[in-house]
Amino acid sequence: QVQLVESGGGLVQPGGSLRVSCAASGTIFSIDAMGWYRQAPGKERELVALVTTSGRADYAASVKGRFTVSRDDAKNTVELQMESLKPEDTAKYYCYAKNVVSRPHRYLEAWGRGTPVTVSS
């Protein structure tokens, strides 16, 4: 069974930096795309950043230029480096994996349980 486990969330002041990480466990052969979604209280879950096996990264307009997503296929990990954080970045950040080929199952999507990020002075 594939599991995604996030780490690294916490409290940071506006303008600060934070990195969240995610590790996928299980017998994994490939993952098409990995990345991050977030959900703020009272709002819908939204895409933050996604990176494919080819290294192509897509970002939400609100984080472009401030956040950087990276993955390590050998370790099945993905990280999100967040800079110049704003109060509106406050949310629960969820790790996401698309089309996970693993044994014994293949998963079209897999989600972590989320890690909270709070940007406040």
Image: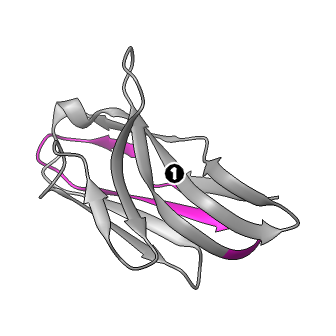
Q: Is residue 1 left or right of residue 71?
A: right
| Picture residue at 71% right of the left edge, 55% below the top | 107
Q: Is residue 45 magenta?
A: no
Residue 15 drawn at (x, y percent): 11, 47
Mark 1 crowd level (few <14, some 14–19, many ≥20, 10 Å Cα): many
Reading the image, the residue beneath label 1 is: 95
Give the residues drawn in magenta, as a range: 7-29
Q: Is residue 15 magenta?
A: yes
**Quadrant showing the C terminus:** top left
Residue 2 drawn at (x, y percent): 75, 59
Tally the numbered discs: 1
In the picture shown, does residue 73 fall above or below 1?
below
- Quadrant of the rendered image containing residue 117: top left
| Picture residue at 61% right of the left edge, 41% below the top | 113
Task: Out of 113 and 118, give the one closest to the viewer.
Answer: 113
Task: Out of 63 and 54, give the one closest to the viewer.
Answer: 54
Decide if residue 26 is in sight here.
Answer: no
The three-letter amino acid code for the residue at tag 1 is Cys
Q: Is residue 21 left or right of residue 11?
A: right
In the picture shown, does residue 1 fall above or below 30?
above
Q: Is residue 109 left or right of residue 120?
A: right
Q: From this viewpoint, which residue is outermost toward the top?
A: 42
Residue 91 drawn at (x, y percent): 36, 32
| Picture residue at 83% right of the left edge, 61% below the top | 105
Colouring style: one colour
